[in-house]
Amino acid sequence: MNSIHAVLFDYGQVLSLSPDPVQWQRMLQITGIEEPVFHHGYWAFRHAYDRGELNGIDYWHKVAANAGTTFSSDQVDGLIDTDVELWTRLNTPMVEWAQRLQAAGIRTGILSNIGDAMADGLLRKFDWLSAFDHHVWSYQLLLAKPEAAIYAAAAEGLKTPPAQILFIDDKGENIDAALAFGMQAIQYSDHPAFLHEMESRGLSRLLAPVPAPAPSVT
């Protein structure tokens, strides 16, 4: 197995936890739609939103139309803001690990299926996202995982051969696509399982990387 020179993270349910149920209930209150209908609409158009085929405003109007209703501009604004909050419960161990990798001089990137308003909201909320060497937000490329071209864009942005990139994602189809592209990959389910998988692959040293020395003053 090739050594790892860069780690590429999915955002949702890797750097973040599962959706916040409090914010989900808030979206139901904003829309006034029954949960099964709202749930269907939320996910039915999500891939098109993530892939940049819909912007945030158009996405929410599609969700409304799916339920046989319309949303006011205030409702759409509230839904965009609440949708961001839905995905902001952080998976602290993974965020802290990414920061340790960065301190050690190991390249880090994010490869996320995400819509324009979601990405903008997260970047405004979390300053630490700017520390990653490269971001691939799917909507910007009109692509989405598991399309092979999006993995190529991530590898190019990280300036690292695919075989030396470790990709971490919660979805099996995205892991399969990364492996087919030539990356190393681990499917994330929970943190203890992730640690066990890293150890079983002989990657324990990567979990506690040595910080890079500070530049000398001359």
Image: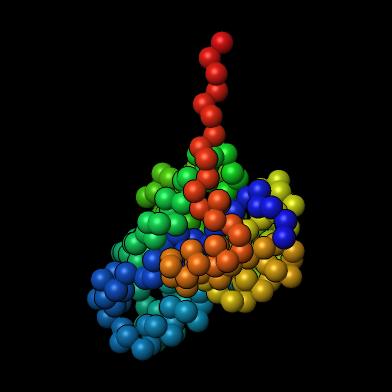
Point 54% across, 62% down: residue? 199
x and y percent of residue 46 in the render?
51, 74
State whether residue 201 appears in this view: yes
Front residue of this view, candidates 47 and 13: 13
Q: Is residue 106 above or below residue 110?
A: above
Front residue of this view, candidates 48 and 87: 87
x and y percent of residue 186 in the render?
58, 67
**Left of 164 or right of it: where is 55?**
left
Q: Is residue 52 above or below residue 164?
A: below
Point 26% across, 75% down: residue? 25
Point 30% across, 87% down: residue? 34
Q: Is residue 178 above or below residue 95?
A: below
Front residue of this view, candidates 100 and 33: 100
Locate the N terminus by quadrant.
bottom right
Locate the C terminus by quadrant.
top right
State whether residue 120 appears in this view: no
x and y percent of residue 14 in the render?
47, 64
Point 56% across, 51% down: residue? 206
**Left of 19 or right of it: where is 172?**
right
Q: Is residue 94 above or below residue 216?
A: below
Front residue of this view, candidates 180 and 147: 180
**Left of 149 or right of it: where is 106?**
left
x and y percent of residue 160 in the render?
71, 49
